[in-house]
């Protein structure tokens, strides 16, 4: 499996990196060119579905990777898991910010304001705050082992809160988003087949791009770690 | 086994608190003087929305001050000694139970003084008290876990506030919604959904603390 993902195509880059570039370009270009269903209120802004929603999907997947490595760290205490967990959280936060920005633009042109008081928007803002707290918590400790352990504990807590704030609470209270508070979901009636043709590749593309970003950060982190150990030898 | 450990630890916490009266009295004085300062600046509050928000903001800061000390003020030596005597699960559960009891009594006292000075606008008092109980339980269980995490760092209060406020905010929002219903005397069926949310957050946080705390105390 590992070998399969390490097959390099050209320029010393693995094949899935080319796939990431291709899929993101496909989503960017195709998303703006392909016909979309004409819907009231949404009109052409429905194209933001390819960017806003897919970035959130990517964020969820990457933050789940972070959670997974935190759990792994607590079960075997290998530093590599801590590196992955922390860098995945960083990339996840980055994608979360992108998702909030694209969502804000969308809100301006459909609901009339850059920010509206909505269960999902507030949940997203709070989730980002929790992850910012995660970064601050990491930076507040010097001792590596302890930092990894405490951060892993907080990361598990943070992801659980993310599930509650983004998946559970908006479904219990009213939300302007499709699929919440009695509004029909996109999948239900208006995500037609041409849109799906862009939507799912875009999800994979953004996620792969996030993984690529994460891989570079982890490599830098691992090299710094090795350099640090070398200095003390 | 766990149950007896928890029972004894809660009793230990209670006895310690009663022996060092200054901590308990300090937090009581804090609540009463905050209410009094609000009284001096507002005189009387007629608007239910303002009355409600002011009350919960007082409760929020009181809870941070009351629960912060649960792990911070314990010396490293005593913590180590406790770990040789009891399992970590028993320690965290006893702390949560003790803090919940402390916060419930504190919130009732706060409610008493608040209605004494600023006036009581609540029409459905049993519902409001149910909110108080669920709210105090939520605040104290979140803060106990965060206090445990913050005490592993260099133990400053700011970090604890940063870690816990994002989680407190939705709790606070839900509480303000339910207690507003109670103040207006709306039918209880309107509030069930929010009560379930509060209960869910409480259960999730308590379970997470139970699972995760043992990893925090491996030093």
Image: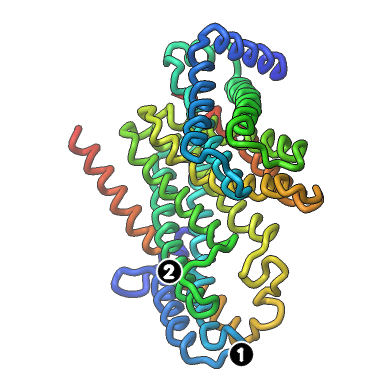
Calculate the distance from the C-alpha at mark 2 to the C-alpha at mark 1. Answer: 24 Å
Residue B55, given in percent of the width and then of the height, sits at 57, 39
Residue B108 is marked as none
Residue A37 is marked as 1
Residue A197, given in percent of the width and then of the height, sits at 58, 83
Q: Is residue A73 above or below residue A201?
A: above
Q: Mark 2 points at which residue?
A: A101
Residue at the image point whose x is 44% and y is 23% from the top: B72
Q: Nearer the viewer, residue A152 or B109?
A: B109
Say if residue B5 shows up in the picture.
Answer: yes
Residue B122, given in percent of the width and then of the height, sits at 70, 41
Residue at the image point whose x is 22% and y is 43% from the top: A227
Q: What element carries label 2?
A: helix
Q: Is mark 1 on a helix, strand or loop?
A: loop
Q: In which quarter of the image is the C terminus of chain B?
A: top left
Disc 1 crowd, CA 10 A, few/some/many (<14, 14-19, 20+): some
The quadrant holding residue A17 is: bottom left
Q: In this view, does A42 lie above or below A229?
A: below
């Amino acid at each position: 499996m590992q070998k399969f993902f390490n097959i390099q195509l050209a320029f010393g880059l693995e094949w899935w990196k080319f796939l990431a570039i291709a899929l993101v370009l496909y989503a960017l270009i195709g998303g703006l060119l392909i016909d979309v269903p004409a819907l009231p209120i949404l009109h052409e802004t429905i194209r933001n579905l390819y960017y806003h929603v897919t970035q959130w999907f990517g964020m969820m997947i990457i933050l789940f990777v972070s959670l997974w490595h935190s759990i792994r760290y607590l079960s075997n205490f290998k530093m590599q898991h801590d590196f992955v967990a922390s860098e995945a959280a960083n990339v996840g936060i980055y994608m979360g910010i992108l998702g909030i920005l694209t969502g804000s633009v969308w809100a301006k042109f459909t609901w009339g304001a850059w920010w509206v008081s909505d269960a999902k928007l507030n949940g997203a803002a709070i989730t980002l705050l929790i992850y910012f707290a995660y970064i601050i918590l990491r930076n507040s400790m010097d001792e590596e082992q302890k930092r990894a352990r405490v951060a892993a504990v907080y990361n598990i807590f943070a992801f659980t809160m993310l599930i509650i704030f983004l998946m559970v609470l908006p479904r219990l209270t009213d939300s302007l988003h499709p699929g919440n508070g009695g509004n029909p979901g996109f999948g239900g009636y208006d995500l037609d087949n041409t849109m799906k043709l862009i939507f799912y590749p875009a999800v994979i593309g953004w996620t792969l791009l996030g993984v690529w970003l994460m891989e570079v950060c982890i490599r830098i982190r691992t090299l710094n770690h090795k350099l640090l150990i070398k200095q003390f030898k | 086994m766990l149950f007896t450990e928890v029972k004894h630890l809660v009793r230990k916490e209670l006895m310690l608190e009663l022996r060092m009266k200054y901590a308990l009295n300090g937090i009581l004085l804090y609540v009463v003087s905050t209410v009094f300062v609000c009284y001096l600046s507002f005189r009387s509050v007629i608007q239910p929305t303002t009355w409600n928000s002011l009350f919960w903001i007082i409760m929020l800061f009181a809870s941070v001050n009351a629960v912060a000390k649960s792990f911070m003020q314990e010396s490293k030596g005593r913590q180590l000694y406790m770990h040789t005597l009891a399992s970590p699960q028993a320690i965290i559960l006893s702390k949560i139970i003790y803090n919940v009891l402390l916060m419930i009594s504190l919130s009732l006292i706060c409610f008493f003084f608040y209605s004494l000075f600023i006036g009581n606008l609540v029409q459905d008092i049993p519902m409001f008290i149910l909110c108080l109980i669920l709210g105090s339980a939520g605040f104290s269980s979140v803060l106990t876990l965060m206090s445990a995490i913050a005490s592993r760092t260099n133990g400053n209060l700011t970090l604890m506030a940063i870690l816990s406020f994002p989680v407190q905010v939705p709790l606070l929002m839900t509480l303000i919604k339910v207690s507003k219903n109670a103040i207006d005397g709306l039918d209880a069926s309107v509030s069930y959904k929010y009560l379930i949310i509060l209960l869910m957050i409480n259960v999730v946080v308590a379970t997470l603390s139970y699972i995760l705390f043992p990893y925090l105390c491996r030093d």
